[in-house]
């Protein structure tokens, strides 16, 4: 299993790299020379409707990976596995039937949808992506399509419904994670090697379609579907289905957004079609990594969302966080800022315990991020790539009014920050978030020093710059860069 997964991942990444290349170096074919695709990109360029605009302005989200894997928490028959806890079934080679008997222990007595929504609200996230079904096949909603659901556990109750309601009430958008790959279903195939395989797989695709329709009917306020587990050869040979699902969801839920990971085209090309156009509404390949702030500026032209784990690679609950590197608060914050500074969203993962509560480290992290966002959130929400050269002190973002923020992670010894601006732009004034003005000195043409006070807290400074911006020139500069 591990081998299959790794091979699939390597392939996925290689394909992706080639496609990104095609996107960036303007080698896209003129429209009339493009391959005629039935299941390629449904649209060229970004979406600008209000729902997509909202997705983009949200910028900060939380991921929740919750399923049966939270019960063993990375340990099977006395052995602790260091790999991702939600993949434990694969690491410990547990047969599906045996794995699914964990359902007899599913009873999250501490689960409180209102408390969850309050924690996320305080953290300052604008959306929550929740695993409706991960690779194991267990559904957090009482699906009529399978017996592997919450309805057939001691807990009995729906988990998605109350969560949707509580999040809706707090004004937090709900996004559904959905794994197409399903280890519980006898008709799932990794590849299609015979007619029988295809027949079985078609039955499986029909089952998946029913599940998606059900989710749309039961929870019509959902804003986004984030697909996963679509890298197998079987899916690449059935790209038509991914296209059909994207269209179906968009018909059932007006404005819904869909990630690029769902999609494969007529030739099995994923994320980007054979003509190099992104499929779906936003790119979702930046997983536990981020684009390089100098080399990868092409991403600033598309919509994208990154997702990150707090330990090295644990999405589901793992009982032992001491076995791998765990990021500190400032590192998590830096990844949020890094993504926004390049025009993307960042989603921070949570892996709730089997009892329905969050581990203390995650609660503490949510609190830290929330405190910082409350004071400095205006440099995140609705902000974008600022078009300025990256400096080693941190990152820039830009709000809709064209004001620029400096988010300072590395406080220099000299307490002076270099700001290099494009021709035609002048820095007029700099203020801290508390309104206090800080000194700006023009050192040479198009270059300034912004002075920062002594730091007395754990986290980055935010400085807001008033610039007399010549939009046109800045855009030209950005064109030249990318
Ligand atoms: C997938 C899942 O296997 C994992 O358990 C978790 O849900 C994560 C969010 O998604 O893992 C992936 C999927 C894609 C890549 C890497 C890990 N990728 O494209 O590099």
Image (cartoon, rainbow, N blue to C red):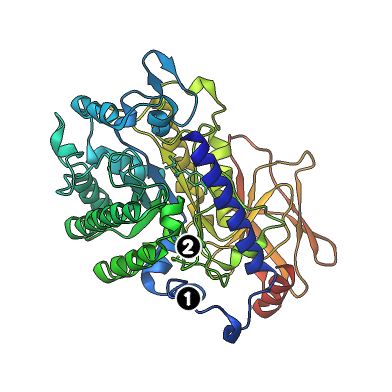
Taking the image as shown, residue 413 lies to the left or right of residue 72, namely: right
> In the displayed structure, would residue 160 be above or below residue 474?
above
| Residue at disc 1, secondary structure | loop
Residue 363 visible in rendering: no
Query: Looking at the image, which residue is at 29% across and 57% down?
Result: 202
Estimate how packed mark 2 is, as few (under 14), some (14 to 19) or many (20 or more) residues with alpha carbons within 10 Å.
many
The image's mark for residue 37 is: 1
Taking the image as shown, residue 34 lies to the left or right of residue 113, namely: right
Taking the image as shown, residue 91 lies to the left or right of residue 404, namely: left
Percent coordinates x, y for residue 275 in the rendering: 57, 73
| Disc 2: which residue | 282
The residue at the far top in this view is: 78
| Residue at disc 2, secondary structure | loop
Quarter of the figure with the C terminus: bottom right
In this rendered view, identify the residue nearer to me: 262 or 202: 202
Query: Looking at the image, which residue is at 53% across and 58% down?
Result: 344
């Amino acid at each position: 299993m591990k081998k299959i997964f790794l091979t699939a991942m390597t392939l996925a990444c290689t394909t992706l790299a080639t496609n990104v290349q095609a996107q960036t170096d303007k080698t896209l074919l003129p429209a009339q020379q493009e391959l005629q695709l039935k299941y390629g990109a449904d649209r060229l360029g970004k979406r600008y409707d209000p729902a997509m605009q909202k997705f983009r302005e949200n910028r900060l989200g939380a991921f929740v990976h919750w399923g049966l894997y939270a019960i063993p928490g990375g340990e099977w028959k006395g052995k602790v596995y260091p790999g991702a806890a939600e993949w434990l079934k694969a690491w410990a080679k547990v047969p599906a039937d045996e794995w699914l008997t964990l359902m007899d222990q599913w009873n999250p007595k501490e689960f409180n949808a209102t408390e969850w929504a309050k924690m996320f609200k305080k953290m300052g996230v604008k959306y929550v992506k929740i695993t409706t079904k991960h690779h194991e096949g267990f559904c957090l909603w009482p699906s009529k399509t399978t017996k592997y659901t919450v309805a057939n556990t001691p807990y009995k109750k729906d988990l998605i419904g109350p969560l949707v309601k509580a999040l809706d009430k707090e004004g937090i958008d709900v996004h559904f994670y959905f794994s197409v790959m399903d280890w519980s279903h006898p008709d799932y195939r990794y590849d299609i090697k015979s007619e029988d395989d295809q027949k079985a797989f078609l039955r499986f695709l029909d089952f998946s379609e029913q599940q998606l329709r059900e989710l749309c009917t039961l929870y019509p306020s959902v804003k986004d579907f984030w697909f996963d587990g679509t890298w197998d050869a079987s899916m690449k040979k059935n790209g038509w289905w991914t296209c059909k699902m994207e269209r179906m969801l968009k018909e059932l839920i007006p404005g819904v957004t869909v990630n690029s990971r769902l999609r494969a085209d007529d030739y099995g090309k994923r994320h980007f079609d054979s003509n190099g156009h992104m499929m779906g509404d936003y790119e979702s390949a930046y997983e536990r990594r981020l684009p390089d702030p100098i080399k990868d500026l092409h991403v600033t032209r598309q919509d994208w969302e990154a997702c990150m784990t707090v330990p090295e690679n644990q999405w589901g609950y793992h009982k032992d966080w001491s076995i791998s590197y765990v990021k500190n608060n400032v590192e998590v914050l830096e990844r949020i800022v890094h993504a926004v500074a390049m025009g993307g969203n960042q989603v921070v993962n949570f892996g709730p315990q089997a009892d329905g509560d969050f581990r203390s480290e995650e609660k503490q992290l949510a609190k830290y991020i929330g405190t910082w966002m409350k004071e400095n959130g205006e440099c995140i929400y609705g902000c974008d790539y600022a078009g300025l050269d990256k400096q080693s002190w941190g990152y820039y973002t830009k709000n809709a009014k064209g004001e620029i923020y400096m988010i300072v992670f590395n406080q220099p010894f000299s307490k002076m920050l270099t700001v290099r601006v494009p021709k035609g732009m002048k820095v007029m004034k700099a203020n801290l978030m508390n309104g206090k003005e800080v000194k700006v000195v023009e050192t040479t043409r198009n270059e300034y020093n912004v002075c920062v006070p002594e730091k007395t807290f754990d986290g980055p400074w935010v400085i807001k710059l008033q610039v007399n911006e010549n939009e046109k020139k800045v855009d030209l500069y950005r064109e030249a860069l990318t």
